[in-house]
Image: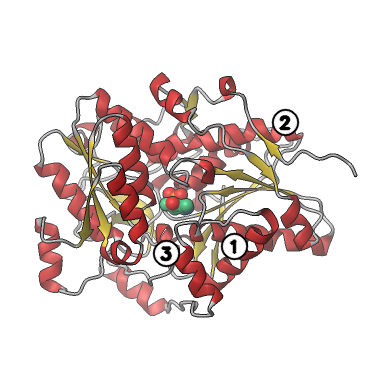
């Protein structure tokens, strides 16, 4: 039997020293965020009260393509980076495809997902700037868990608003956050003005990322020395995630290949941008042999902002506290179905990804819930890793492309991001295996109605 290489790992000194800021090189820059009161472009000073200053500067940085990763952040990255690049021989065999399938395994981080890459950076900048408390929202709990751990690494207190339905249905991530010392509150709650307003109107509100963001933003605004952090959507979050793609680029080189397709699941865009942008820079530059790569974002059919939303200015939260962002959106009042990929249930897409989609540099596909779990189970049996329900969408899109290769006989190279493992999401797998999961049809009228309300 011919000996094959399964996993590619970088030595510590090859862990990237800089993140890649695609905003500096995009053919069309994203349109500016707007102050909701004046509708004028936002200035860094407008955001300083809310976020760590360095994060704001990164958010608005349109000129520096490379941004140094602080030594202390890189030291923490060494706890789990580089993450392996894995050749999915088992999946290739199961599909009978000539495609070469690789995945970047971000599930090996201590919190089980890519989110820690940005949580560490954000907690570090807060610590540097003398902040003592951080707050945030979380859906299924991946971001909250990552922030809770990162805050504990730097000796900062974390207060997390968790979407109420996830707080009740997914108790283990709450336990993880509490293990790291975070204070966790189900949202909507009576602890904020925003939460009270929502509960007065809808006493049985199950919560959404939108309600939880409103509450966390309010807490940050009304608490001294407290900053708000976000786990997706914003440009500085995606910037931190480019460590994934920069490593993957070196690892693909070790494998002697270059991807024809780069695929990731899509919630707000951070793991997609994280793996895609370092490769996309070669496409933007039109480099020989690297300009043909396709970039495919896989979103749930029940929350299809990229495939069925509209490109326009909208708020990031339910209460309309956040700046207005130019993005593909389903409307900030959109209440997504209670699908099991909690991390993908957000109404909008980040401004950078939105612009790139508009400009045709990337594509988007939607995946029904049942197809995503079928893909996840096939992958689990073939590769021995239970993927997060979110990551199952990337796997489903990968399988579609690999099957096309099986039909055409083309030996394409596909790279996808395994954004997290699903070991804390087994209740979702139980439901799928018992035949209790369904697809959600989303009528055009519902999307139209929400967009008309903006
Ligand atoms: C949060 C999350 C996502 C979605 O967030 P993005 O910013 O779109 O990457 C995807 N996968 C996992 C495992 C997550 O925790």
Residue at coordinates 51% horizontally, 68% vertically from top-left? 429
Q: Does the beta carbon of the residue at mark 2 sit less than 8 Å from ligand 1?
A: no
* Residue 436 x %, y %: 49, 80
Q: Nearer the viewer, mark 2 or mark 1?
A: 1
Mark 2 vs 3, N-terminal side: 2
**Is residue 184 visible from the viewing direction of this image?**
yes
Residue at coordinates 55% horizontally, 74% vertically from top-left? 433
Label 2 element class: helix
For this view, does 372 lie left or right of residue 228? right
* Residue 294 x %, y %: 64, 49
For this view, does 371 lie left or right of residue 116? right
Asked if 14 appears above or below 189 in the picture, the reply is: above
Instruction: List the residue tagged with mark 3.
Output: 309
Mark 1 and mark 3: Cα distance apart in space: 26 Å
Label 3 element class: loop
User: Dot 1: within a 10 Å radius of its alpha carbon, few (fewer than 14), some, or many (20 or more) residues?
Assistant: many
Mark 2 and mark 3: Cα distance apart in space: 39 Å
Q: Which quadrant would residue 150 be assigned to in this image?
A: top left
Instruction: List the residue tagged with mark 1.
Output: 376
For this view, does 273 lie left or right of residue 122? right
* Residue 414 x %, y %: 69, 49
Instruction: List the residue tagged with mark 2.
Output: 254
């Amino acid at each position: 039997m011919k000996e094959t290489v399964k996993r590619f790992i970088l030595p510590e000194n090859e862990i990237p020293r800089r993140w890649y800021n695609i905003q500096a090189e995009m053919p069309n820059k994203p349109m500016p965020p707007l102050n909701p009161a004046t509708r004028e472009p936002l200035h860094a000073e407008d955001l300083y009260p809310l976020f760590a200053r360095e994060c704001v500067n990164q958010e608005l940085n349109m000129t520096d393509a490379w941004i140094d990763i602080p030594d202390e952040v890189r030291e923490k990255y060494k706890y789990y980076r580089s993450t392996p690049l894995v050749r999915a021989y088992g999946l290739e065999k199961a599909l009978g495809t000539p495609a070469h399938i690789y995945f970047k395994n971000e599930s090996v981080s201590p919190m089980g997902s890519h989110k820690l890459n940005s949580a560490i950076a954000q907690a570090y900048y807060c610590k540097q700037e003398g902040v003592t408390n951080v707050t945030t929202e979380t859906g299924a709990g991946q971001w909250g868990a990552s922030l809770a751990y990162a805050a504990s690494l730097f000796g900062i207190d974390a207060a997390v608003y968790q979407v109420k339905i996830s707080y009740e249905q997914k108790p283990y991530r709450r336990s993880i956050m509490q293990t790291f010392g975070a204070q966790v509150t189900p949202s909507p709650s009576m602890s904020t003005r925003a939460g009270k307003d929502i509960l007065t109107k809808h006493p049985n509100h199950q919560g959404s990322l939108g309600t939880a963001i409103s509450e966390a933003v309010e807490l940050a605004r009304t608490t001294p020395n407290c900053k708000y952090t976000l786990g997706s959507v914003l440009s500085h979050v995606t910037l931190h995630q480019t460590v994934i793609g920069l490593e993957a680029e070196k690892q693909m080189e070790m494998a002697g290949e270059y991807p024809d397709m780069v695929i990731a699941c899509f919630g707000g865009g951070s793991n997609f941008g994280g793996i895609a942008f370092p490769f996309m820079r070669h496409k933007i530059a039109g480099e020989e042999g690297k300009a043909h790569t396709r970039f495919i974002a896989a979103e749930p059919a029940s929350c299809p902002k990229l495939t069925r939303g509209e490109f326009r200015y909208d708020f990031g939260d339910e209460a309309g506290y956040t700046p207005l962002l130019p993005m593909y959106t389903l409307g900030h009042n959109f209440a997504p179905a209670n699908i099991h990929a909690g991390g993908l249930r957000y109404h909008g897409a980040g401004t950078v990804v939105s612009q790139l989609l508009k400009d045709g540099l990337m594509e988007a596909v939607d995946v029904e819930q049942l197809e995503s779990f079928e893909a996840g189970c096939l992958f689990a049996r073939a590769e021995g890793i239970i993927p997060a329900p979110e990551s199952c969408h990337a796997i489903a899109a990968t399988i579609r492309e690999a099957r096309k290769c099986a039909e055409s006989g083309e030996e394409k190279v596909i790279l996808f991001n395994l954004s997290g493992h699903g070991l804390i999401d087994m209740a979702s797998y139980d439901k799928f295996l018992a035949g209790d999961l369904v697809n959600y049809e989303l009528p055009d009228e519902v999307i139209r109605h929400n967009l008309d309300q903006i």
